[in-house]
Amino acid sequence: MIRVEGLRKRFGGVVAVDEVSFEARDGMVTGLLGHNGAGKSTTLRMICGLLQPDAGRIHVDGADPVARPLEAQARIGALPDAAGLYARLTAREHIEYFGRLRGLPNDQLEANIDYWTRALGMENIIHRRAGGFSHGERTKVAMARALAHRPQNVILDEPTNGLDVMATRAVREVIATLSKEGRCVVFSSHVMQEVSALCHRIVVLARGRVVADGAPDEVREQAGEADLEDAFVALTGQKLEAV
Amino acid sequence: MNLQRLGIVARKELVDAFRDRRAVGVLAIGSLVGPALIAFSLNAQIRRQSVAELRVPVTGAQYAPLLVDWLRQQPDVTVVEGPRDLAAAQAAVRAGDEDFVLAIAEDYGEDFAALRPGRVRIVRDSAGRSSGASRDRLRRLVGRYSEEIGWLRLVARGVDPKIASAVSLQDLELSTAQQRAGRILAMIPIMALLAAFSTALQIATDSTAGERERGALEALLLNPVPRLELVVGKWLAATIFALAGMVATLGLMAAALAMVPFAEAGVRFSFTVTQGLQWLVAMLPAGLLAPAIEIYLASFARTFKEAQQYMGFVIMVPMLALVGALTFPEATGVWLAPAPILGQFELAKEILAGESPAAIWYVLGTFSTLACAALLLGLTARLFRSEKFLLGR
């Protein structure tokens, strides 16, 4: 479970995240919805202990990423926005590297590699070097690498951004499975359709602030709009980007 | 620090680097260029020193039997029969069959008997590939013959030949072949240090600035691993390359030195296995520091290209210091041993000169150099923790 209270972060004179609070429960998919620059990535990076908030508190299953980032990171598996691969390593070596860094014993590492290879449909690329991978293949490897230890808390920053239909479907299936397994999944997106299809709970961010928070139905209610997309426009005063 | 995790990071970087043709190429070139250069210049220097046989083709030897006999008696001079006349001599030189020909005029004997200067020509082609040094030597020899005969003529007339010379000009050559060779040998430690910097360069920049540029570093930082371990792991990989480069350079250098004909040039030089090991012990700390410097500076760069620009300076700075130490040898001494890089150079130089620096200098040099490396790695880890580093600003 991830809980965020009154999170603030400014870069120079720009307030990137302003009083953001929400809770992402186990067994649920929580979506952070907002435009580019709304503060989604900054919020997720603070949860992962990569950025220090100026104010506010974060709990990741009782661990505090601000005071003890490594403790929180041990409980999280996170896919950053731009997750670059090592062009000269194979897909398998990517998963192995991160799994070993997290101290997985060999048999468990093997089992997890097998699991992700199947779950993400990577059978044909698992022994190939990442240099020539398509965007979809790269995202799958980056995801398997981030989740090599099969963490309780999963953070995915725009995981489906720029993916083709097949790869998007694979990622969505993984997200659904993760929450069915009782894990806490937080993912960010600017695609309304995706958020409404996958999320049990939506947190709408605009200019660093939470403008709506709740189940999809509640968000529609808060905005007074029947359609989620219209609700988003009403809440943020901005149109959603074309998918 | 978790050693197992250090190994995991280092291993990944090594696998990555070994699959990188550029890194392996740099390793190979970096450790080959130095020895090749040294062997070549030492050989050239020594060939220049050694007194080669002077071969003098003479045309018209029958007109000046005294001169030709005198030339034959000079050490390292061989007189051979040249083309049959002046025209043939000119043709031979023009065609490049001879570098030069000593051509004695038909009336030389007549002039000589009449106490007039006999005409002797050196046929040469300065535009061609003629050997200036040999020609000058022949010119001096003929001049000396002329002088000796002149003196004899003066003595025969009861005149002191000394009055014919108003000035006595002598060259006082101070450098010996030994010293000239020594100057080149002092380049060896520089080459080894250069190898340490150049072979680690690719891996140091690619594993920091390169990964940052490609967005791979943020994913790595999401693992619950202390930043210092990540940095030290990357440094370990770069250091293995640097040490491999240094050992290869020194080994190849030793092999190259074995092929240089020192004795032929009268240069006393021997390099024992013990000296070689002393050398390694003295210089290896630089192989630990060079990658630390590179990793630290490359971590400031946002892109691989930017990092490469920094690396140009990284290599320049120690090289300038070393050139300074070479240029002002009187200002250096074994007391420089505790200075990073300069100290390794100084110790290596002392060993090369046949000295045995006291163990304390090795200890001080190693300790201070490792302390510098540790400081830089610590600073890099701090950089890895900073937000600026992550956000690329």
Image (cartoon, grey):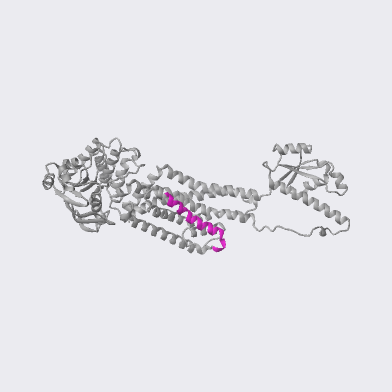
Counting from the top left corner in percent of width and height, residue B128 is at 68, 41
Q: Residue at x 63, y 51 (%)?
A: B263
- The segment highlighted magenta reads B308-331
**B313 magenta-colored:** yes
Q: Quadrant of residue A167?
A: top left
In the image: residue B103, left or right of residue A125: right
Residue, far front: A237
Counting from the top left corner in percent of width and height, residue A228 is at 15, 42
In the image: residue B36, left or right of residue B377: right
Dominant SS of magenta comes to helix
Q: Nearer the viewer, residue A154 or A99?
A: A154
Q: How many marks?
A: 0
Counting from the top left corner in percent of width and height, residue B18 is at 41, 44
In the image: residue B254, left or right of residue B131: left
Counting from the top left corner in percent of width and height, residue B366 is at 45, 60
* Figure check: A143 above or below A73: above
- Asked if residue A24 can be seen in this view, the reply is no
In the image: residue B200, left or right of residue B143: left
Q: Residue at x 69, y 48 (%)?
A: B133
* Figure check: A178 above or below B328: above
Viewport quadrant of the N terminus of chain B: bottom left
**A176 magenta-colored:** no
Q: Residue at x 42, y 60 (%)?
A: B372
- Asked if residue B290 can be seen in this view, the reply is yes
